[in-house]
Amino acid sequence: MTAGGAVAVTARAVDLPPMLEPFGDLALTVAVVLTVAVLAFTIPVWVASRRVVKVEAVAWADDVRGDPSATWAADRALRVLLASCEREHVVFPGLSRVVVGAERIDVDLVTPTVAPPAPWTTGRDGRRWSAPVELVQLEAVPARRPDELATVVALGSSPEGRVLVGLEALHGVLGVDGDRASRLAVARRVADQLATSPWCRSTAVLRVGVRDDEVAAGALLSLDDALDVVVTGASPGVLFLSEVPSASAWTALRSALERPENRWGVVLLARHEQVRWQLTARRDGTLTGDAVGELRWVDVALNGHEAVAVPAGLARPSADGAPASPPVPSVPVAPGTAPAGRRAQPSRGGAPQQGGPVPTR
């Protein structure tokens, strides 16, 4: 077919007026080009207008400051819990987890107890006590904050409410794996609560392999020195480990934590098969694990802190960073300081340098 014949066929196909038949092919071409151009512009604009920009929580979470009402509600619930046990002469069975919701407070117990004090109720197995928030608010709140709560911290929120766990009550290691920035974000929130929560302010905090610019709380020690403190375990505290220690150190640590009288909790920022709970921190602000389901760690905002306690017997850092002598009783240590261990000579694994590897036992 000739070109003229093609134009004629096209013109007849679209029933163009006789006067426009010579321009039929050109008109259709221009129309197609304009249509494609309009679609090429409008479709991306429409898609962009409907797209939700997802910003990772680790990029902004630390800039959000906490709401004091969340801490106040948890503090009241915990004090009422222990005061009700004391009032009715019920031995407090220890808590592994607490969920403070808008309407109800649930307490998962270490030791099942089927006869809770008022206003708490329980099921047949006695593993969980529950009470309506309105009844808890009517209870008298004692001025004393019990020592049993010294390692209770919030890990995040769930649809049921704010979720707190007792690190000491685990009598084992809490493992947090996942992206390093997310793991450290969870660690900062735990350390921040140990410094600011009214029931934790005397709780000691130690770090092994976790730099000051990663978690600015507590004392940075060698693994040997930290193990000596945890093995003693007479007073409550929390130890942060940046990685899994040697086999001998791990065995000593687990044996110490499993003793009923030990008051320490350990947070391992890594994965290990022999931890009590293994959780995974994600950059989107969530924390997942079989023991807790899915929580939002991003909902636990930082409060900011001035000092965290250091166990008795550790040297107070001097102005230039060198250990002062003699050692003093438990004293606050300002964020960013790294007191030396109790030994005068470096430990078997060597004294850790800021940002250096974790010494092994």
Image: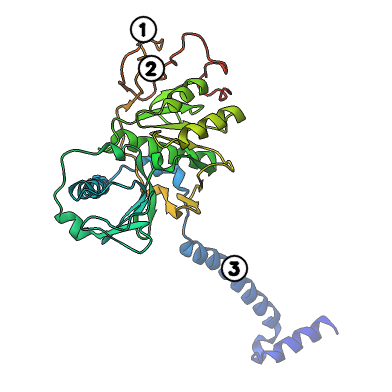
Q: Position of residue 195 (x, y in %)?
A: 31, 33
Residue 212 can be seen, yes or no: no
Q: Which residue in the structure is indicated by mark 2? A: 314
As measured in the structure, the alpha-carbon distance from the residue carrying label 1 to the one carrying label 2 is: 10 Å
Which residue is painted at 40% across and 10% down in the image?
323
Q: Residues within 10 Å of mark 3 (few under 14, many from 20)?
A: few
User: Residue 337's image quarter?
Assistant: top left
Which residue is painted at 55% across and 38% down in the image?
270
Residue 21 can be seen, yes or no: yes
Camera-nearest label, 3 or 1: 1
**The one of 340 and 32 positioned closer to us in this rendering:** 340
Q: Position of residue 97 (x, y in %)?
A: 37, 50
Q: Is residue 341 left or right of residue 361?
A: left
In what quadrant of the picture does the C terminus appear? Answer: top right
Tag 3 or tag 2, which sits nearer the N-term?
Answer: 3
Q: Position of residue 122 (x, y in %)?
A: 31, 61
Q: Which residue in the structure is indicated by mark 3? A: 37
**The one of 284 and 110 positioned closer to us in this rendering:** 110
Q: Is residue 37 left or right of residue 156?
A: right
As measured in the structure, the alpha-carbon distance from the residue carrying label 2 to the one carrying label 3 is: 73 Å
User: What amino acid type is highlighted by mark number 1?
Assistant: Ser
Q: Residues within 10 Å of mark 1 (few under 14, many from 20)?
A: few
Up/down of 1 relative to 232, above or below: below
Which residue is painted at 16% across and 43% down in the image?
142
**The one of 163 and 225 positioned closer to us in this rendering:** 225
As measured in the structure, the alpha-carbon distance from the residue carrying label 3 to the one carrying label 1 is: 79 Å
Which residue is painted at 35% across and 36% down in the image?
192
User: What amino acid type is highlighted by mark number 2?
Assistant: Leu
Q: Position of residue 257 (x, y in %)?
A: 46, 35
In what quadrant of the picture does the N terminus appear? Answer: bottom right
Identify the element where label 1 is drawn.
Answer: loop
In the rendered structure, find residue 325 and report the number of the disc placed on it: 1
